[in-house]
Amino acid sequence: MEARLEQQTKRHWSTEEVEQRDALAYWVDTICNRFLELEIDTPLRHRFRASLDQTDLGPTTASFIRADVQHVRRTRAKIARLSAPIYVLLQLREGHIQFRQLGRETRVGPGECVFIDGTEPYELACPQPTNALALRLPANWLNRWLARPEHLAARRFGAGGWSAALCAALASLDIASCDQLALPREQVAEQIASLLTLAVGNEISTRSSHSRLFDRLMHTLKGRFQDADLSLAAVAAEHGISKRTLYYTFAAANTTFVHELMGLRLEHARQLLSERDLPVTDVAAACGFNDSSHFARRFRRKFGVAPGQVRRTKLN
């Protein structure tokens, strides 16, 4: 019975199902609704072909994607509609891609993987037809293995060590084999998360005292970001360090106290706006903002839309 139920989770979409003139629009709508909201363009507008096969692996979703030449962008406006933070582990099987995110750029070839932060803009250029697996990883689940997965944005995994093991495990997955797994699907997802952790293990195991302090500081921010009176000085005092030490700890992680605090507040605000019918002023207050107009400016700067637009999109 369990095997039959799992087989029912397979989904399939193809541009072959629509008129050729509608293929690109159909593909954009399919990807946005079933995978991740993206802007997609192609020089093959009148003869574009693509397909998406999808199945669930516990809390994760595996998308097997075949597509012609395309250029993919994830924008602030698209990100604003995301109800909860997610990451994507993308493995290329055929073709090659050029990936850019947060000022980092990497070329990914067959068999290699790239880690994508779904909460930040990115560009993905596919100059030839591609075949890929995209594993969608919910942030609240992935954080059980990696404390700061956003630091892996645009990180490529290829030959050698645990990276090779991670790539080999992903390469063994296809839409048919997911119905014949020796372990429950959730355990398979956990194995992949474990391999991902091992692939970045050297970085984790050699973290400096600054990195360990940074994790403790971020734990405090995550627990208290809704406090409107939270300040750099208060957090430093709570950890028994000077403000200068706190400043340098965040700088060593290529970020700032204000950037991280504001990011936590705004991500929580976006989630509240997407899931609950609350006035914008109440959302601002619930996320640690004393001034709703300041909140609105910050929200628009990060996500490209006004807070009220997120709520109206949800209601519509």
Image (tube, rainbow, N blue to C red):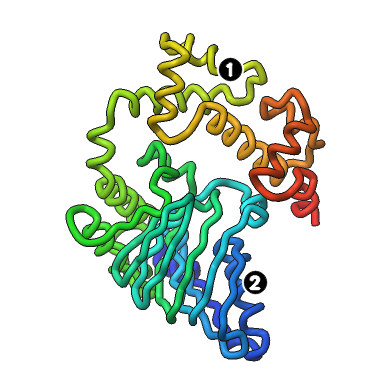
The residue that appears at 62% across and 72% down in the rendered structure is 28
Is residue 262 toward the left or the right of residue 128 in the image?
Answer: right
Is residue 49 toward the left or the right of residue 182 in the image?
Answer: right
Q: From the top left corner, tell me how far across and down residue 122 is, in percent.
A: 52, 57
Dot 2: few (<14), some (14–19), or many (≥20) neighbours within 10 Å? some
- Among the 4 quarters of the image, the one containing residue 217: top left
Q: Secondary structure at mark 1?
A: loop
The image shows residue 111, relative to residue 269, as above or below, that is below
The image shows residue 270, relative to residue 165, as above or below, that is above
The residue that appears at 62% across and 89% down in the rendered structure is 46
Q: Which mark is residue 29?
A: 2
Image quadrant holding the N terminus, namely: bottom left
Question: Is 245 or 316 nearer to us in this picture?
Answer: 245
Q: From the top left corner, tell me how far across and down residue 158 is, in percent.
A: 26, 61
Q: From the top left corner, tell me how far across and down residue 229 is, in percent.
A: 65, 16
Dot 1: few (<14), some (14–19), or many (≥20) neighbours within 10 Å? some
- Among the 4 quarters of the image, the one containing residue 160: bottom left
Q: Secondary structure at mark 2?
A: helix
The image shows residue 90, relative to residue 44, as above or below, that is above
Residue denoted by label 1: 231
